[in-house]
Image: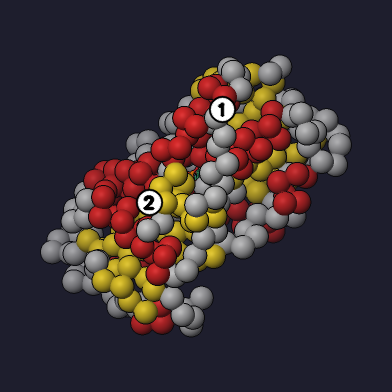
Amino acid sequence: ICERDGWIWHNGDWLPWREAKTHLLTHTLHYGMGCFEGVRAYDGPCGAHLFRVAEHTRRLRDSAHALDMPLAWTAEQLIDAQRECLSRNGLTNAYLKPTVYFGAEGMGLRAQGLTTNVMIAAWDLGGYISSEAASIGLRALTSSWARHHVNISLCRAKTNGHYVNSMLALNTAIKAGFDEALMLDPEGYVAEASAANVFLVRDGVMHTPEITSCLQGITRDSVIRLARDALGIEVQERRITRDELYTADEAFLTGTAAEILPLRELDGRRIGAPSREIAKDSLTARLQRLYRRVTSGELGDDLGAYRDWLTPAP
Ligand code: PMP
């Protein structure tokens, strides 16, 4: 991953990919306090564009603020850097990872006298999610690892250290032969997957956990808005129990990288109809088609309201 051509933005400079190195005493490496984003770019009718970069950049700045990491860059500067990251690296269908971290000026939990640094790397996404996963769906296991609690960490912040918990859950599920982990909150209600939000459909109504311990996903927001505004579907944000997922008509995961992925099985229980592929007229498939149109910029007249979700590369 390190030995390749390309450019990485670092504190306002463009570093050649191979030379973008950091010191072993970098504070964030030791204690995990930092925050990051995962942003998608898509190839569209007028070249590459970033999807909902303003919302991702706002969440990054909010995360840094909540963690009390002073960020020297405005949203506009960070958005410009992300746009240029695409053009400099010749990318269209890409994933960007802006990251905020403390420097190597000192050790210790007081975190005094540390610089707050920002880097933005981007890479080609090719086929990150197979079209097979998008039509057949995932098998998940309810994890024994609980998701974060509001009194233990900052659930709104996309903090590097949170992902220890995600990795424990995901890798336990994978070792047990599953594709994904479903994570409950500390009280036992459905929270999210290891790095995606979760939805269920029952009797034509969509339900998703309220954002107490799950990340306030931007794809979650896109899907809620598309369901409500473009499809006229009722969406309820509320506490959900795992048996509601077992007995749902449909369930799916949402995330910037995952997009919309059907959840076909939880803890060995089939969710919804026992067909190999999800039905073309299922709500999951309809949302996938809408989401694809919006992200690829093929908006037409009916989806014109979503044009401001797209920010073109320079
Ligand atoms: N939850 C977690 C824990 C995540 O890491 C992600 C991916 N960022 C999501 C949910 C989905 O968020 P988004 O749609 O903003 O990518």
Vertical order, 156 against 3 (above or below): above
Q: Which residue is mark 2?
A: 159
Q: Residue 160 occupies which quadrant of the picture?
A: bottom left
Q: Residue 20 occupies which quadrant of the picture?
A: bottom left
Vertical order, 202 against 303 (above or below): above
Please name whichever residue, 80 or 103, is drawn nearer the observer in this view of the structure.
80
Gap in angstroms between the C-alphas marked 2 and 1: 37 Å
The residue positioned 43% from the left and 31% from the top of the image is 212
Please name whichever residue, 278 or 53, is drawn nearer the observer in this view of the structure.
53
Vertical order, 203 against 210 (above or below): above
Q: Can residue 275 be seen?
A: yes
The residue most toward the right is 275
The residue positioned 65% from the left and 49% from the top of the image is 180
- The image shows residue 153 at horizontal and vertical percentages of 36, 43
Q: Which residue is mark 1?
A: 302
Name the quadrant of the C terminus.
Answer: bottom left
How busy is the neighbourhood of tag 2: few (under 14 within 10 Å), some, or many (20 plus)?
Answer: many
- The image shows residue 185 at horizontal and vertical percentages of 51, 35
* Of the two numbered discs 2 and 1 in the rendering, the one whose residue sits closer to the viewer: 1
The residue positioned 40% from the left and 77% from the top of the image is 17
The residue positioned 14% from the left and 61% from the top of the image is 112
Q: How is the image coloured?
A: secondary structure
